[in-house]
Amino acid sequence: ALGAPTLGANTGLTAIAGTTLTPPAAAIGTGSGSIDLRSNGGTLTTAGTLATTSGTITLSATGLLSIGHDLTTTAAAGTVSLTGLGVTQTAGTITAFGATTVNAGAGTISLAQATNDFTGAVTLNNSGANNVAIRDQNALVLGPSAVGSGTLSLTAVGVSQGGALVQAAGAGAVTVDAGAGTIALTLATNDFTGAVTLNATGATVSVRDTNALALGAPTLGANTGLTAIAG
């Protein structure tokens, strides 16, 4: 178990356990330093808020990674890396100014707190029949993502991408709720194997698939345009 550390203004913190790491029930702030907490042989559950400006927050477990407290980065270089056999959020807010990478292995991804705010691109990776859900109170930008055969839920005020989104064969439904924003999932290398339902009231909703594309019934604004391209 890790006690509450006393750190310098920009002192980074690394703690690695061969089995299960138990973080302190205390807020940890490292200024521009990074935070690296790893359970190399077990689960990892947050016990207090974690914050850095331009450092990286790395949380890694060989078992389930459970986030129940705020994770915050406030500069473009301030990235977040989340790894586990499943990555779930039970409480708290993730505020990531830089890129966020989530690797959940053969487990679910559930980062669905309404107050989350991902400014940088978010990359989502998992496998198997495991669902993926992410929510952003503002716009959501996806990085290159490869998900399993479960369902995929994206909720934000506008959804776009900077890398291809690929589902495993025979995957579940994809639901994109973009509120008053737009949807732009238009990369030619996307591959949706589940039916895609697009809901938004912004100016345009667009989706593209390198192969066959099945569309669910969309919920659109009075003047929202729809573009869907397969192959």
Image (cartoon, rainbow, N blue to C red):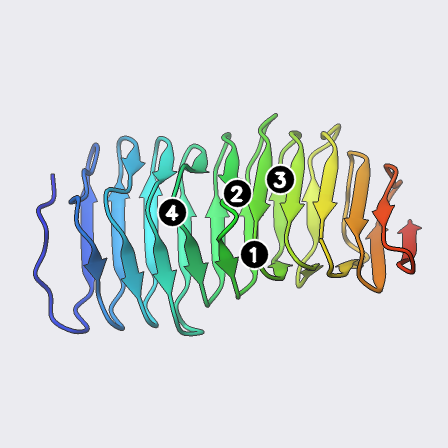
On screen, residue 93 versus residue 157, left or right, reads left
Q: Few, some or many C-alpha atoms within 10 Å of disc 2 (few <14, some 14-19, many ≥20)?
A: many
Earlier sequence position, callout 2 versus callout 4: 4
Mark 4 vs mark 3: in front: 4
The amino acid on which the numbered mark 2 sits, given as a three-letter code, is: Ala
How many numbered tags mark residues here? 4
| Residue in the image at 7% along x and 61% along y | 6
On screen, residue 45 versus residue 173, left or right, reads left
| Residue in the image at 17% along x and 44% along y | 25
The amino acid on which the numbered mark 3 sits, given as a three-letter code, is: Val
Earlier sequence position, callout 1 versus callout 2: 2
Q: Mark 2 points at which residue?
A: 112
SS for tag 4?
A: loop
Q: Rounded to the nearest whole Å, what is the CA distance between mark 2 and mark 3?
A: 16 Å
Q: Mark 3 points at which residue?
A: 147
Tell which of 79 and 200 is nearer to you.
200
Q: Rounded to the nearest whole Å, what is the CA distance between mark 2 and mark 4?
A: 10 Å
- Please, is residue 210 above or below residue 22 in the view? below
Mark 2 vs mark 3: in front: 2
Q: Rounded to the nearest whole Å, what is the CA distance between mark 4 and mark 3?
A: 24 Å
Instruction: Tell me where residue 120 appears, x and y as whole percent.
Output: 53, 65
Instruction: Tell me where residue 167 appears, x and y as whole percent.
Output: 70, 39
Q: Name the residue under label 4.
A: 92
| Residue in the image at 68% along x and 60% along y | 161
The amino acid on which the numbered mark 1 sits, given as a three-letter code, is: Gln
Q: Which circle marks residue 37 in the picture?
A: none
SS for tag 3?
A: strand
The amino acid on which the numbered mark 4 sits, given as a three-letter code, is: Gly
Q: Rounded to the nearest whole Å, what is the CA distance between mark 1 and mark 3?
A: 22 Å
Q: Mark 1 points at which residue?
A: 137
